[in-house]
Image (cartoon, grey):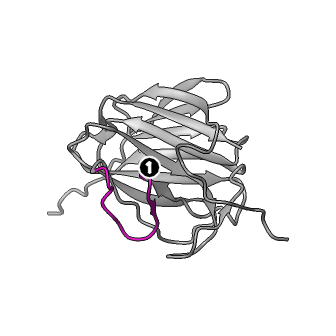
Amino acid sequence: MKTMFIDTQTGEITIEETPDEVTETQAPTE
Amino acid sequence: MGATVFPAPSVQTDRNWVQLSSVTTTAVATISFTSLTAYKYYKILSNKLVSSNGTNVTMTLNNDSTSTYSYLHLFNNTSILTTGSATGTTGIIIGIAGQGSASNGYSGVVTINSDLTKEITYTAYGNNSRFGGSANWFDASQISRIDLTVTGDTFGTSGTIKVFGSN
C-alpha cells in the first residue's frame, strides 16, 4: 500500500510503501 | 473554557483562500496532507478524484488535541452534509457520513459519482456538534493532517487535488 505525504508548509512530497499484510496459512495436518 | 465559535462560511465566496499545495494523484492508497497547523479553515478542491474501482474515498481529519475537533463536515459547494448521505446538487459529489465521536479525528465516506466531469469541493472544519446538530464552527487550527484514503483500492484516475487554508 502506498501513501503519499504532502507537507503543506515545505512542499515536500514523499511516498511510503508498506507491505500488504500477509496471512500465514497453516499446513494441513496428516 | 469555551472555544471560540465561528460562523459557517460561504464556502466559495467570503474568504480569501490560500493555496497550500497542489498534487496530482498517482496509484497511491492514501494521500496525506500534513503540517496543517496555521489556518482556521481548510478546503480541499479536486477534480476527477476517483478510486480505480469506482467506489469510496474516505476522508479523515486528524488533530493533535484530544477533543473538540472530532468532526469533519464536507460541503458540496452549497450544502452542508452532516449525517447519513445525500446526493450532491451538482450530481458530482455524493454524500458524507457523520459518525462516531473519535477523540483524534473523524472519518466520513465520500462516494464518488462515476460520471465525474466537474470539479468538486470538499471543505473540512473543526466542529464539535453531534449528529444532526446545528453547525457550530470552531477554530480548526489544531488540525494537523487530512487524509484521503480510498476504500479497497487505490486512486486510479489522475486528478489534481489542491488544499487551501483560510483564517
Would you say residue B17 is visible in this rendering?
yes
Residue sitting at x 51%, y 27%: B22
> Residue A20 at what x, y percent from top left?
36, 43
Q: Residue furthest front?
A: B13
How far across and how far down the image is residue B5, in percent? 73, 64
Q: Quadrant of residue B125?
A: bottom right
Q: Position of residue A12 (x, y in %)?
A: 60, 23
Q: Chain of mark 1?
A: B
Q: Residue furthest left?
A: A30
Query: What residue is pinned by disc 1?
Result: B77
Residue under the point 69% across and 66% down: B68
**Towards the viewer: B128 or B56:** B128
Is residue B80 one of those drawn in magenta?
A: yes
B11 relative to A6, above or below = below
Most common SS among magenta residues: loop
Indicate the amino acid at tag 1: Asn
Is residue B154 visible in this depiction of the protein? no
Instruction: Tell whether B10 sits left or right of A9.
Output: left
Segment colored magenta: B76-90
Q: Secondary structure at mark 1?
A: loop
Image coordinates of residue B16 in percent, x first then y, are 64, 37
Q: Quadrant of the N terminus of chain B?
A: bottom right
Q: Give the image quarter of residue B17.
A: top right
